[in-house]
Amino acid sequence: MARSPASIAPPVHLALTFAAFFALAGAALLPLPVLTDTDSYYHLAVARLFADEGLVDQLDWARLSLLHDGFGDKEVLFHLLLMPFSGSGALGGHLALALGHALLSTLLVALGRRAVGAWGWTLPAIVYLGSIDFLGRAVRLRPEHGALLLILLAPWAVASGRARLVGVLAALYAWTHTAVHAFVGLCVLLALQRLLRDGAAREDSGPGGGPALATALFAVLGAGVGLLAHPHFPHNLLVWKVQSVDFFLFKDVLDVGTEIRPPTGRELLLGALPAWLAAAALVLARPDAGDGAPTRGTTSSATRRLADAYLFAFAVFGLLAVLMLRFVTFALPLGAVALAFALARRGGVGRRLRLGPLALPTALALALVLLPGVVRTVDFLGQLRAPVLESVADTDLAPGIDPETLGREHEWSLFGAAVPEGAAVAAEWGSTALYAYWAPQGRYLNVLDPVFMASVDRSAYAAQRRLFDGDEPDTAMVVAETLDSSHLALSSFHRAPRLLERLDADPRWRSVYRGWTRLEALRPAPAGTFVVDWTIAGRPYPLRAGPLGLLEAFVDGRRLEPQQRDARGCFVARHRQALSGPVELAASGPTAAWVDGAPIASFGIDSGAVLGRGLVVTLPATGSELTIRTCPDRQEVAGFFLRRLEVPSAGPTRPNDETG
């Protein structure tokens, strides 16, 4: 029997809605030259890895991370769905992102139409134009997009008594996002709210209905099934524990992003001002006589349950958003749906807006209050679409490539080609997300979150952070010994310029590739470049044996016994063999030097032991003993480089020079 037009209208309507929003999202995103946020490339890299090798249980990009052995991919479903889009960089990522936004917009419209009819079409506009903080996160290819869809469905499923559906959603969430506890907690609280409101545990409320307590039980069971059936079980449970518990214990000492901080009052009010004004416009609109809207007393019980559920969910995630900026991703869409059902509960939305003595069409009022959001959105997308114009000085690029107009993804591919197969590369966790896609043959330290490295090796994490903050004077030794790496990768626009200075002046580093991204390789300095044979408090300075000994350069007070340092941490080093000619003395903190008891140098500032910025002195040929006294700098590091300046060398390393 053929279906009536009415029975097929909703699916057709949803399909057309999805197609329209997909076209709109694609038009906004596809012109963008790169994916916003480096984590976006990590997710594409994992999806490509799954497509090529299956559900691997080891992540070689994170040698010193909890994710290395067992992996425990906390977003495995998201990565499986990304596999068809993983091979074409920003193009594939933006297509996947456009699909996600089309799904979200369609769901918002469907829920909005269920509440307030045609006014439901305003919900995507309120969400996307209402908050710059939401928009800034919405353009990132992250698993929050999938998690948001499930969280938007949760209040509807719980309020409708669809217990089994709640269980399915919880199982899917366990494969989609780390915070499965947040989803389960929300469902349990919604079920308890429904129980208290209805006054009975066994109220059937529609298709698939069931008692409120059964809904809560299915949420817990669904999440449990999802966690236990995870392809990386049981390592996924360890990853959940570290990111959901340990992260908050250690976040104050981790180099985490700004998204976990509380928003300022300005961000809450002005950042989302169009959304607040749009909500006010809809609230002030009154149902006119003849609108056909139900009165307060005739609102259905289902609508009242949905209004209560979405308002409660918005209150939960609104509070979380006040505590942590990242939750605006969930709070704003929930708030828009909660507003729609709250309006439905009071009788709907009228055609006119009452503003004192004025009467303006509600649609015009919404357009006016959302206009700043339109301007801000266009400006934001324009900034993301702007071509990269930074020049790259002294960079050897492929013939015919103009560094002034070189695309970022093309430059990253050139960097990726320069990374040797299997090279152990020291890199920051945030940048590794980028390298994992463009140089997957490399072996890095950590990816996705600093807590994954800090939870495995606190000392290595601390060393990595000192290194990339520019505070570590002996970069080569830390990379080779503590971080077990032969290469170092970073941006030419690094936030700590002192690190770039250290690399450029240290003869133990050789540039393999230097563009917007840099790749440096370790090599021993020419023999005799650094003076390292010292006596400190009657004992020889402890030199390393084997290959690490070839990298000795920095005389490091951290390697001395306590009795070799005074109460302030200062130490005195003596070199008894004759030295002459020009030398550079680069020390961490206040330092003085003597030859046979006669002072030759003294400085009382924290210089950071940066080679190339040290004090150059000429040692007399007649001297028989050189004495140096040095004290800690603000980083509590006492030590110095003493470099001979007349040692024969190959000269400065040319960028991308593979020799040396």
Image: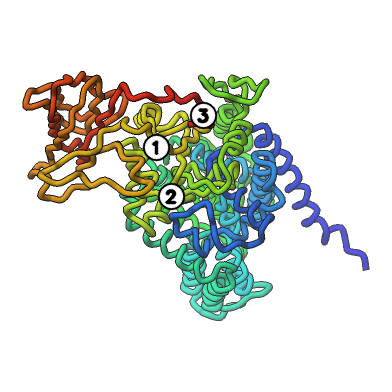
Amino acid at dot 1: Pro
The residue beneath circle 3 is: 514
* Disc 3 from disc 1: Cα separation: 20 Å
Relative image position of residue 499 (x, y in whole percent): 37, 33
Left of 244 or right of it: where is 194?
right
Mark 3 surroundings within 10 Å by alpha-carbon count, few (fewer than 14), some (14 through 19), many (20 or more): many
Relative image position of residue 127 (x, y in whole percent): 57, 43
Tell me what residue is drawn at x 16 percent, y 19 percent.
Answer: 620
* Secondary element at tag 1: loop
Q: Can you say whether 158 is above or below 105 in the image?
A: below
Mark 1 surroundings within 10 Å by alpha-carbon count, few (fewer than 14), some (14 through 19), many (20 or more): some
Residue 248, picture quadrant? bottom left
Residue 258, picture quadrant? top left
Residue 391: assigned label = none
Q: Nearer the viewer, mark 1 or mark 2?
A: 1
The residue beneath circle 1 is: 524
* Secondary element at tag 2: helix
* Secondary element at tag 3: strand
Q: Can you say whether 101 is above or below 181 in the image?
A: above
The residue beneath circle 2 is: 321
Q: Can you say whether 298 is above or below 576 in the image?
A: below
* Disc 1 from disc 2: Cα separation: 51 Å
Tell me what residue is drawn at x 73 percent, y 40 percent.
Answer: 23
Tell me what residue is drawn at x 22 percent, y 39 percent.
Answer: 533
Amino acid at dot 2: Ala
Is residue 365 in view? no
Q: Are marks 1 and 2 in contact (CB under 8 Å)?
A: no
Amino acid at dot 3: Arg
